[in-house]
Amino acid sequence: MKENQGFKLSYLAAFIATVVTNSAMADTSEQTPDAADSRNIDRVEVIGSIQAYRGDFSPLETPQSELDINANVLTNAGALDLSQALDLSTSVARQNNFGGLWNSFAVRGFVGDENLPSNYLVNGFNAGRGFGGSRDLSGIESVEVLKGPRAALFGRGEPGGTINLVTKRPTFETEGQVRFSVGSFDTYRADLDYTTTLSDSVAVRFVGYYEDAESFRDTIETKRQGMNPSIAWQISEQSQFVYELEYSAQEVPFDRGVIAIDGVLGLIPESRFLGEPGDGPMEADVLGHQLEFQHDFNQDWSALVGFNYRDTSLESAATETGFGDVVDGEINRFRRTRDYDATYHVFRAELTGDFELSGLEHRIIIGMDSDKFENDQVFLRVRGEQFINVFDPVYGAYPLPEPGPNTDRVETQESVGIFIQDQISLTDKLDIRIGARYDDYDQELNNRRSDTVATQTESRVSPQFGIVYETSERLSLYAAYGENFRPLSGSDADGNGFEPNQSTSMEAGVKFTLNDGGLFGTIAVFRVEQENILVVDDPEAFTSAAIGEAKSQGIEFDLAGELADGFELWASYTYVDAQTENAFFDANFGFTVEAGSALLNIPEHQLNLQLVKSAEVSGNLLEYGGGVLYVSERNGFFGTDFELPSYTIARAFVNYEINDSISIRAEIDNLFDETYYVNSFADVWIQPGTPRNFRISATYNF
């Protein structure tokens, strides 16, 4: 297997090198102004808007590692949803995606609550919680991977880092784009993006998509649609108001993937579906509203006030493989129905400014926010004699049984926080950053089935410290320390809430620019320690306690930008050593997990490389290139020795602008038709990767 992967990597490298060399020899002319303008159509933003919690800092003077995945990189990578976008950052590893119904990821080795989607931000708002399905990128301008704990500003978050999505907002120009795509497995998709002005001070934008697709998985068919209309009002030269709506509706069959028989993968085809098509698809819906008001008092001081409300739901039934062994070719299953509803609303206000005190320059962010997350779950389950032959499945062999009560509860988390961050310039080259956030939160778990209520009240201070030294305009050195916490859902044996999950992080690195600023890179080393992980404290009663400990440490390398005239490079590599620190019982299966065990779905090595060439052909822009993703072996079943094998997949694309309005794009994913597995929860819930597939798109700009 490894020799075969090495051959494929060598073959791909030779292929890209040949293409690049031939292109450089065939066309050394400069790109025309019209071609350059057409490439930038998706990069225009509302003039003067700022990101919440961020302040005004250049990358070289920010004492933490960050990676900005812009629209052009996302397009070249063929990324249509958040999971595909995050593959570009090797600091992020895919986790169990709940049968394809949400985004779940680990940053620097650590994941959040495995029973909820991974949290992410949208324009600085907490928005990832809830059950709205996998996040589509149609309304997203860029994806920011903000590494390290950010609780000192953002509040409660994931321990390894924060993902922030920057949305497409109105511009004060009139332009639009329509794209139609067709691909493998009868995949059809349409995208629309249109922005215009209603007056000199008001602009609107409408972004929407519709997708109908079958799959390489037997019987699986999905339908997705969504829209993101927005309006921007430039009240004055100093004030701006923006409103955005988020709507999506998805119909996605619940698909736990394939199984490993006696620990061996590949004994059944990756297309084999082991659920019941008669259950129909799960329905995931989102309706969200986001408002922001920004006022610039002068060139040094600015205020930002915002509000976000997001309502999500997930409902339907699913038949899933159980955790027993395959006997005579058959495995048992259980059937569950879910009726999940979640609402999340956030208010925030912040003030940013620059001032001088005692001869030192201060750049300060100060503010407050509040949020409320309500998670309502009704969950029914039935076990029994629901066998399926994994080698020769017969769907509909049993009448679909009616599930009985299992979970009926609503959990509410409320928080109010205040935060401050000050970056002080001690010299022209040396800055220090000091910050802290105070959170007061309440947690209530209303178990309607047992008619009990558990409450938890906590107050936490999350500090951060950083130092950055700019040795020159092209190089800076930095170090940072931060703390982070995250509430845990559920209650212990006595009906009380759990102590929140706590993590600390240290990192140090170097940031640099090359090629006259065309390339930007970061090399970082990090260490993250986590405690109060939810585990089993009594294997017989199977009650839980927050007593688990783990650590993650490693090194990251990111480099992106213009390698040479007409060549764009994206390179990301991460080494992570993520393991448990103490022995405990796994909260899902009760297996003993020894100290030093690898964490689930975390590869030691990940590499993503992408190279794009731009040239002029007959006066029009031609772009082509390829990329490769390598993921090493991973623990596939916590508490056991089952591992997912490493894999290497490659892609290639070509895009040609026929004229100023029309372009054609063709792309192939999994170029060498690799059989691979992206994540698992256990040896019977394993998500296979997609075989070789293609997509052809036509885009009309107007």
Image: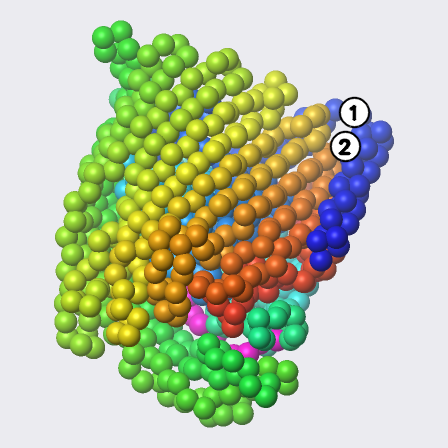
Q: Which residues are magenta?
A: 272-284
Question: Of the numbered discs in the image, which one, if any, rests on residue 677?
Answer: none
Residue type at mark 2 is Glu
Between 83 and 227, the one lying in front of the other is 83
Proximity of marks 2 and 1: CB atoms separated by less than 8 Å = yes
Q: Is residue 283 magenta?
A: yes
When asked about the image quadrant of residue 46, the answer is top left
Query: Does 416 appear above or below 643?
Result: above
Quarter of the figure with the N terminus: bottom right
Q: Is residue 248 left or right of residue 567?
A: left
Residue 29 tag number: 1
Residue 536 at x, y percent in the picture: 30, 65
Number of callouts in the render?
2
Q: What element does badge 1 sit on?
A: loop
Residue drawn at x 24%, y 44% is 347
Residue at disc 2, secondary structure: strand
672 vs 408: above or below:
above
Q: Residues within 10 Å of mark 1 (few under 14, many from 20)?
A: few
Give coordinates of residue 393: x percent, y percent.
60, 85
Where's residue 345, x and y in %? 26, 51
Quadrant of the drawing holding the C terminus: top right
- Circle 2 residue: 616
Q: Residue at x 33, y 73 (%)?
A: 339
Q: Is disc 2 surrounded by few (<14), some (14 to 19) or many (20+) residues within 10 Å?
A: some
Q: How far across and how far down the image is residue 197, in percent?
A: 45, 38
Residue 74 forms part of the magenta stretch: no
